Image (tube, helix red, strand yellow):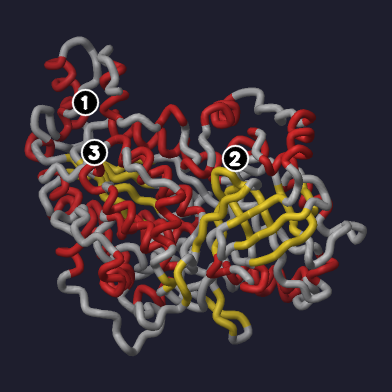
């Protein structure tokens, strides 16, 4: 880091006297038992997202100690600091509402506190993308590390894991197949260890993408939270952080077009979370990489589904880990990847994979290009007059017969409206209906995971297991079904979704990439003239979020957070920002 102070002398507190700032800083560090030998070492910050509310991070204190050990072994000085933590289950209305807040806070803490490198410890769904966004903006050498997935359990002989099986069991309960005592019993068998969901939900997907992008050390994405492999990955991350500081391996050198496109290809091969599309767009935007839904769709069209993991398959993360994890998957993908992409350990992806053995014949989790689990476009982009700026569907978890469908709309105005009316016996709905949820986008309500809302009870009890659903919301990466998500522009800003009325015909043609509202344009213009936007929140973060959040097709980041950190710093110094 030529031209700037290092270690504890970085980013001095402003007293108008730099000498006094250094003197005072070292005086207070002496109270922590540190001497000049300690303080001459490179400082590695360790962002700790432990929280009693984030049960996924239960094992993180041990992981923090493992990272500290690696930093010390490599000659660095570890400093652990807390950041906000985003629990997926214990936050209202949705953790996505606070992803950008966590990214802002993490960025500012990384740049405001003295550190030559940082290890970002995340796990639960929005923590990792928030940290990746912060890393790109702060541009301090950074290593992303995750807490790791839970281990599976079982109930009455059936292997179970959160949270695809949570949804499957709850659907059976709604359909009357499991009684109250049985659903209570199964509840204790779904999440039995520390760690994130052990299917290919958002947490597992983002862990794999961080490794694929080069921000996480090789092999670190899939090790279970409770395993020795997870602790060893922490020690490696600590060592890598010290080396990254010495080599000035900043995120701006790693999060390149090659890294982003590799991550997108891995996302499709995994049949990963649709949420990861939004997060990948946000990371790319902050990195200044021109990467859009069209770029993603072009990649998806040539990458087959290779990983047998729920909800697109039948396995779990511990199975993927035993099969070799992300390194073996990327070795299998071969020419579908850019092997010249840089990685945080130094060198290139090609260097990282050079000694990785091909997928073993004994395992069936990682399939070959010749015998994939599914065709290309496990995740697909849709466009049309109902989604001019795009929408996303996970075809690998959809009902094939429904991916080409035309039916009348049944419109819900909000997630709360769904909860009030979806089980009403008088609801005018059939299995051919297209269920529409609106005002659930980034501006409308922070974009909750409400897109895979339940099948109306009367249909579920009649045996209906899936219906076409369309919304400007998200769905959990652990979910499944023929669910069209992230419709942009969203209803709350006047997107066409706001104009849909009960009974309007909607056509989905996923193979053609089309989502069409079969209403004459003249009628839509008449409806638009009557439309008025919903009220914005009155104050605080939610008002700020509604005023500055971008659409899902742009990553749902803040418009104020897109410029590179260097431009922000120049502006603060009174210099003219780059055009």
Q: Position of residue 530 (x, y in %)?
A: 79, 30
Mark 3–mark 1 Cα distance, whole angstroms, equals: 12 Å
Mark 2–mark 3 Cα distance, whole angstroms, equals: 34 Å
Q: Residue at x 32, y 36 (%)?
A: 137
In the image, residue 424 sits, relative to residue 6, either above or below, namely below
Q: Residue at x 82, y 68 (%)?
A: 459
Please name the residue that numbered disc 3 is placed on.
Answer: 140
Residue 513's disc is: none
The secondary structure type at the circle numbered 3 is loop
- Label 3 CA crowd tier, 10 Å (few <14, some 14–19, many 20+): many
The secondary structure type at the circle numbered 1 is loop
Q: Position of residue 344 (x, y in %)?
A: 21, 53
Q: Position of residue 77 (x, y in %)?
A: 17, 44
Q: Position of residue 153 (x, y in %)?
A: 53, 77
Discs 1, 2 touching: Cβ within 8 Å: no
In the foreground, 108 or 511: 511
- Of the two numbered discs 3 and 1 on the same chain, state the one appearing first in sequence: 1
The secondary structure type at the circle numbered 2 is loop
Mark 1 or mark 2: which is in front? 2
In the image, residue 488 sits, relative to residue 477, either above or below, namely above
Residue farthest right in this picture:
426
Discs 2, 3 touching: Cβ within 8 Å: no
Based on the displayed image, in which of its 4 quarters is residue 460 positioned? bottom right
Residue 489's disc is: 2
- Of the two numbered discs 2 and 3 on the same chain, state the one appearing first in sequence: 3
Please name the residue that numbered disc 1 is placed on.
Answer: 11
Based on the displayed image, in which of its 4 quarters is residue 523 positioned? top right
Mark 2 or mark 3: which is in front? 2
On screen, residue 158 versus residue 240, left or right, reads right
- Label 2 CA crowd tier, 10 Å (few <14, some 14–19, many 20+): many
């Amino acid at each position: 880091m030529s031209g700037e102070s290092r270690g504890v002398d970085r980013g001095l507190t402003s007293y108008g006297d730099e000498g006094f700032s250094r003197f005072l800083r070292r005086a207070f560090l002496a109270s922590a038992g540190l001497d000049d030998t300690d303080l001459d070492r490179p400082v590695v910050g360790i962002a700790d997202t432990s929280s009693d509310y984030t049960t996924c991070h239960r094992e993180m204190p041990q992981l923090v100690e493992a990272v500290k050990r690696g930093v010390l072994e490599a000659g660095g000085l570890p400093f652990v600091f807390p950041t906000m933590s985003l629990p997926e289950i214990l936050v209202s209305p949705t953790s996505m509402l606070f992803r950008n807040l966590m990214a802002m806070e993490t960025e500012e803490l990384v740049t405001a506190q003295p550190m030559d490198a940082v290890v970002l410890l995340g796990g639960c769904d929005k923590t990792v993308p928030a940290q990746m966004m912060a890393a790109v903006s702060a541009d301090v050498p950074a290593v992303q590390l995750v807490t790791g997935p839970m281990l599976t359990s079982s109930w009455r002989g059936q292997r179970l894991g959160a949270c695809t099986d949570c949804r499957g069991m709850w659907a059976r309960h709604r359909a009357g197949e499991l009684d109250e005592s049985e659903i209570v019993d199964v509840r204790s068998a779904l999440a039995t260890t520390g760690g994130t969901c052990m299917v290919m939900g958002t947490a597992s997907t983002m862990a794999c993408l961080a490794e694929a992008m080069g921000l996480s050390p090789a092999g670190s994405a899939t090790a279970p939270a409770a395993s020795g492999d997870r602790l060893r990955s922490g020690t490696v991350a600590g060592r890598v952080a010290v080396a990254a500081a010495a080599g000035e391996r900043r995120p701006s050198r790693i999060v390149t077009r090659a890294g982003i496109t590799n991550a997108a290809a891995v996302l499709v091969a995994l049949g990963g979370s649709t949420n990861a599309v939004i997060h990948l767009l946000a990371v790319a935007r902050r990195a200044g990489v021109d990467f859009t839904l069209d770029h993603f769709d072009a990649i998806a069209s040539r990458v087959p589904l290779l990983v047998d993991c729920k909800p697109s398959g039948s396995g779990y993360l511990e199975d993927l880990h035993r099969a070799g994890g992300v390194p073996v998957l990327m070795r299998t993908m071969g020419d579908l990847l850019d092997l010249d992409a840089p990685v945080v350990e130094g060198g290139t992806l090609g260097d990282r994979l050079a000694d990785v053995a091909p997928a073993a014949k004994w395992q069936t989790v990682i399939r070959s290009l010749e015998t994939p689990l599914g065709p290309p476009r496990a995740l697909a982009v849709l466009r049309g007059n109902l989604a001019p700026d795009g929408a996303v569907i996970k075809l690998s978890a959809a009902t094939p017969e429904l991916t080409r469908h035309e039916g009348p709309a049944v419109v819900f105005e909000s997630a709360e409206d769904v909860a009030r009316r979806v089980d009403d016996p008088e609801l005018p709905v059939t299995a051919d209906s297209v269920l529409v949820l609106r005002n659930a986008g980034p501006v409308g309500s922070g974009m909750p995971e409400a897109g895979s809302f339940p099948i109306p009870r009367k249909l579920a009890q009649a045996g209906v297991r899936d219906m076409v659903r369309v919304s400007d919301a998200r769905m959990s990466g652990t979910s499944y079904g023929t669910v069209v998500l992230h419709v942009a522009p969203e209803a709350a800003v006047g997107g066409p979704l706001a104009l849909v009325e009960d009974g309007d015909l909607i056509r989905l043609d996923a193979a053609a990439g089309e989502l069409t509202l079969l209403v004459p344009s003249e009628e839509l213009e008449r409806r638009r003239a009557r439309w008025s936007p919903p009220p914005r929140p009155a104050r605080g973060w939610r008002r700020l979020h509604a005023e500055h959040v971008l659409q899902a097709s742009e990553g749902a980041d803040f418009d104020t957070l897109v410029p590179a950190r260097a431009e922000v710093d120049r502006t603060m110094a009174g210099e003219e920002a780059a055009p």
